[in-house]
Amino acid sequence: MLFKIAWRNIWRNKMRSIVVLSSVAIGLFAGMFMIAFFQGLMKQEVDNAIETQLSHIQLHNPAFAEDKEVSALIETGGFILDQLRKNEAVKAVSGRVVTGGMITSSSTAAGVEIHGIVSGDEKNISSVAGDVVEGVYFNPGKKNEIVIGQQLAKKLAVKLHSKIVLTFQTKSGELTAGSFRIAGIFRSRNSAFDQTTVFTAFDDLALLLGTGKEIHEIAVLLKDGKQADSLAAGFKKNYPAVQIQTWSEIEPEMAMLTGLMDQMMYIIIGIILLALMFGIINTMLMAVLERQREFGMLMAIGMNKTRVFFMVILESLMLTCLGLPAGIFLTIGCVQFFAKKGIDLSAFSEALSQLGFSSIVYPQLQQSMFLPVTLMTAFTALLSAIYPALKALKFKPAVAIHKL
Amino acid sequence: MKKKVLVLCSILLPFAIVFTSFISDDPSAKDIVSKAENNAKGLSSIMEMTIQIVRPTWTRSMSVKAWSKGEHYSLMLVTAPAKDAGTLFLKRVREIWNWVPSIERVVKLPPSMMAQSFMGTDFTNDDLVKASSRIDDYTHRIAGDSVIQGRKCWKIEMIPLPAAAVVWSKVSMWIDQKDYLELRIEFYDEDNKLVNVLQCSDVKTIGGRILPCKMEMIPAGKKGQETVILYNSAVFNTTFSDDFFTTQNMKKAK
Amino acid sequence: MMYLQLAWRNMWRSRRRTFITISSIFFAVLFAILMRVMMIGIFDKMIADTVSMSTGYIQVHHSGYWENKSIDSTFEENPRLLEMLNSNKHITAWNPHLESFALASSGERTKGILVTGIDPEKENLISRLSEKIQSGRYLGNKDSGILLAQGLAEYLNLMVNDTVVLLGQGYQGNMAAGKYCIRGIAKLPIPQMNKSMAWLPMQGSRDFLNTGARYTSLSLMVSDRTQVDAVKRYLLNQIKGMSPVSGSGRADGLDYEIMTWQEMLPELDQLFQAKMAQNVIMSGILYLVIAFGIFGTILMMLNERMHEFGILIAIGMKKRILAGIVVLELILMSLTGTFLGIAGAVPLVLYFRFHPIHMGGDWARTAEKFNFSPVLQPSVDFRHFIIQGYAVLSIAVVLSLYALVKINRLKTINALNS
């Protein structure tokens, strides 16, 4: 019967109930949206690095990591490449020849890492193709083209269609040079990358290197980035002679920054829940104060204190139960909306919009997050109800009835 | 009849002589450059030179003794100043080694150092190694005559072949018509801007040959900056065995 | 004036009600401040840790050095300059470097590296290099030896006490060459740096490059990230009249260039700006929760006093005036709550400042390698306290205006009967 009373109590004062209910809903929404936002953030930052240069997994000859020796080619590289292409979990692969060398223009020279790529494959795996700001990302059929970063072009004082010379060592240790024309200029988010990486066609570079069809580096983009570690372990078993690294092993700083975000997230959620708790406590306290006369009357006609206490708790419970689904719907709705549209961070930061990069975050919610956050919010809401409920008991019936 | 032929021949003959001498006296641009280049490098030699690095705020001078065999092998020994004396550079085709007495080590220059300046001069290590050939990597054209240092020269315009690993879009060379000496070379970039000038002067007889004894590499657009090489003495056509140009032999050079 | 008196008396008529309302604002302000200073503190630390390992907050160079990094763009050790750095209270440390590109060689192997002349003590204060030593020992001030990065040592197949040869381009075209005994090997967390760095004591580097008493850069650490621009301006002012090169004929200080970390590390600045933008969104979400909490309290309070309002209106008080008084009450309570909130936040934030939250686990260990101490520590910039307080106050005041709406729509009969 307590249930019935509690339920009717709720609907007697719609305003109050709606406020508490909304607080719970908003609290849940806040928590979940925050997490979705963070997830979207991390993904954006990681994806950035992965798409520009790292990819999810990279394969090399173990000797290659030492000093990028031209002779450190992947054994049976072509075979491995084909196998990876067929792998279900793999979204895209690209085989490259990579070497260090010098790029020279008529005014100056710079040390660079030269990537010989197959533009068709590389387009699917690296965002550089999309980052081309001038010219094109390779004309099919044309030989000896090169694509360089904007920063580097400035440093070398060259422009589109300018000629430059690349100098590097061949497989047999001799020094060789080749002239290339700039077909495209790109600008990525990583200016260090722009300054030190240049792209040529696989065949052009391999010809000069004397490496034929052999490959230095295989980059793998997965359909699901989170599988990177497990897939890498699998590859290690299949290709024991090859060095296999995930992006976090190649660039540990990235992994570290995302770890920082994770830690921050817990603190932020904690604060939000605390704010929620106090918000609810205050609202309910006020409500209890408002219902003094009502409680007084109930106690006067014989309801014992325990029952009153539970009644209040039950009311909170019911409101919470109503509020949670509302919060969930709100969250799903907002997340879906923004997941498509994206939240443009540069709208909030003048400095960012000046940089010219679109900083769009797409919030993402993991299913696994729903339950923990919901439970935490429910728990917080109920906890918040205890103190006001206790307060309700302190009323003396006689005084309460006469309360004005 | 006989008389007519004789008259005809005697009229035509002078023209024929003039005509043939005309064709045979005018070499192709490529030939001119070939001759000049071979003149400059060509044979084996032992030379003593002074290298001056001139900058707006300082100048440095070095004395160098150089042994060369053809254009592929050479050994250079720094003889002055005392601080750097004993330093050696060995060039074999496209590779360069360095011996520094104070550290008692032979170090091979890695490819990444190739574009670095050679001993602080306006020449790069790559220039020493001369990866590209002025004869094979360009098309040549005579663009007229000029007079430089009182000598009549051909002005040859050289455009690099599309596949040539050359950063210049055009190189202009003035070659002395009498002795086939390269007196002036101008290097242009793709915007037709002058980037470097190599000026050779002070033509003298040295070691029995006629050569310009002062070479100045002047980067355009950098005021007060140049590198000057003065040839003080030279002995040509010495014979060296290939063994002379090895890292083992380097340390024995004097 | 009378309204103020009425408002004041109303507040104290029901202490409970007033306290509840004030406390809702109090907590709102507290949490808003806490979240903001926590976030800012974390960003500050991220920047501080990154710059301490690399460029410092500000660097002083010979003008043009950052672009061309040529050994000829060095500047002289100027006691006046150093004294100026020492005397500025915002500069907490400065660190001289004499850097150049060189060839490191051992046996058959040669590699291009960056060799940096350091003041071992000063360097350690900022980048904690000695903590990265894996074998051997750190450099002493007058040491004749060299410190190598681990990746480099491995490539050259060298260990502590072995000899490594350095070859390079010295000052004014001089050849730089030297043989050094490896005193220690340090492991740097960033693989690229780990494969290509070496350190010499300042005198060793000067001898190698033949520069005399010169530097390529001076890195400065400041007490507070927000002071960076002010310090830069101060330095620019002060160096007028100093010349980086004696006898160069210039005494207008323009031969120096002073760069901030944002100019030297644009990526980090970009990351930082992005984080600030994210901060805006996260604060927004918090404000939403706070607003609901406050609103709920206000709503309940109005509900509770319906009967009282009904009587007042019935006896003739104009609705407008009643509403005005109630809003005034709410504003007073909001102000009180805000001040108390700011005051209450102070000890709380200070506590976390001195007892920061320690993070554990794998992440913590990795972070330490990057010189990131794995703690979360709030900023103690009081401006944030004020700004957050003001934000919550504004929210509260806007919500208070609801009282106007509610009271105006009041139906006296219903009010009397509640």
Image (cartoon, coloured by chain):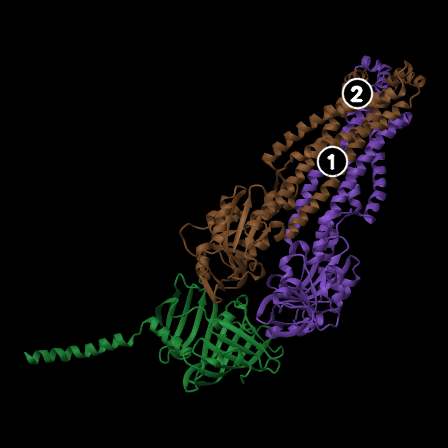
Question: Horizontal placement of C139 versus B34: left or right?
Answer: right
Marked residue chain, label 1: C
Relative horizontal placement of residue C14, taking residue C49 as reference (left or right) = right
The residue at 75%/22% (across/down) is A18
Image quadrant in which the N terminus of chain A is located: top right
In the rendered image, the vertical position of residue A391 relative to residue C387, given as above or below: above
**Tag on residue C407?**
2
Which residue carries the number 1 mark? C286
Colour used to depict chain A in the structure image: brown
Q: How many marks?
A: 2
Q: Position of residue B165 (x, y in %)?
A: 44, 64
Which picture quadrant has residue B83?
Answer: bottom right
Residue occupying the point 58% across, 61% down: A66
Callout 2: helix, strand or loop?
helix
Q: Which chain is purple?
A: C
The chain displayed green equals B
Residue at horizontal 61%, vertical 32%?
A337
B163 to the left or right of A27 = left
| Spot occupied by residue C126 in the image (x, y as percentages of width and height) | 74, 60
Residue A15 at least partly seen: yes
What separation in Å lies between label 1 and label 2 (alpha carbons)? 29 Å
Front residue (pair B6, B165): B165
